[in-house]
Amino acid sequence: MTALPQGRKSRVEILPDGKSVRKTYNREGVPSGKYAREVGFYLHLGASERLPDLIDHEPDQHIVVSLVAGERVADIAHDEGRQRDLSHDYASAIADLFADRQVDPEIKAQNYLGRGASENRDRLVASLTSLATALGHPIIESLIERVSDIEITEELLIKLDWNAGNTFVRHGRIHKFIDFEQAFIGTREILVGILLHNPVWHAPTLFAEMRRSGFFHDRADGILAYLSYALGAVIADSVERSGAPWAPDRLERAYQKHVMDRFEALM
């Protein structure tokens, strides 16, 4: 039986039926929190054909989902041409997944501690402020300033981890998305910033389609605040799990790659 790639925050295994996968949460972070966020995402959006089926879930321990067929984008999108070809379809699939999906108040309360988009923005600012005190780096100060100025629009249940290993292609088209343990309440604009964070996608193609789908109404240069939110959230999550702040050179490389390079690609 083929082994599945293992992440840092959970362990996955194909079950004997060969059609389903058990995901068990490890101790990097809070297992019950990861479980609650992922199950909440399935309860809210699991009717979409873009997600595997949630077959079973054991409170605070594991979930069982249907095995996803296809190739991971991370394994096939190695050149700009392929990335460009997939980016329009990717953006359309994301827009389809989140179309007309207002946040369910009960799921928000039970699975996300009742924390809305405003509170999550403010918690991120507080986390970055603590890092700024410890690290004293101007990049952190810049992230704080931009994230603090973000205006909250209609809430949307989104997630932080949209890496290319969590997106599957079948018959040349975007097929399904997996891994939702980093789900949280945000907005459409915050989602766009998070999607653009990943350099595997062709930024102008992705951004144009998300704008066409109504996920971003601000001026194009307004995306800088949301790219900053995405990087800030990645840093805060990493520090919370590891307990160690990023070294200045790592911070500077990430800022250039995930914020400035992506921003400049859109201008």
Image: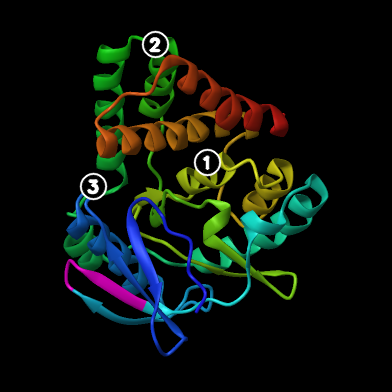
What amino acid is labelled 2 in the image? His
Label 2: which secondary element: loop
Mark 3 closeness class: few <14, some 14–19, many ≥20 residues within 10 Å: some
First in residue order: circle 2 vs circle 1: 2
* Residue 77, horizontal then vertical, whole percent: 71, 53
Q: Which mark is residue 256?
A: none
Quarter of the image where one finds residue 264: top right
First in residue order: circle 3 vs circle 2: 3
Residue bearing the label numbered 2: 137
In the image, the segment drawn in magenta is 59-64
Q: CA distance from mark 3 to mark 2?
A: 26 Å
What amino acid is labelled 1 in the image? Gly
* Residue 7, horizontal then vertical, whole percent: 41, 55
* Residue 241, horizontal then vertical, whole percent: 27, 39
Left or right: 3, with 239 as reference point: right
Left or right: 161, with 135 as reference point: right
Residue bearing the label numbered 1: 193
Q: Choose between 253 and 119: the one closer to the eye.
A: 253
Q: Looking at the image, which residue is at 33% across and 53% down?
A: 9
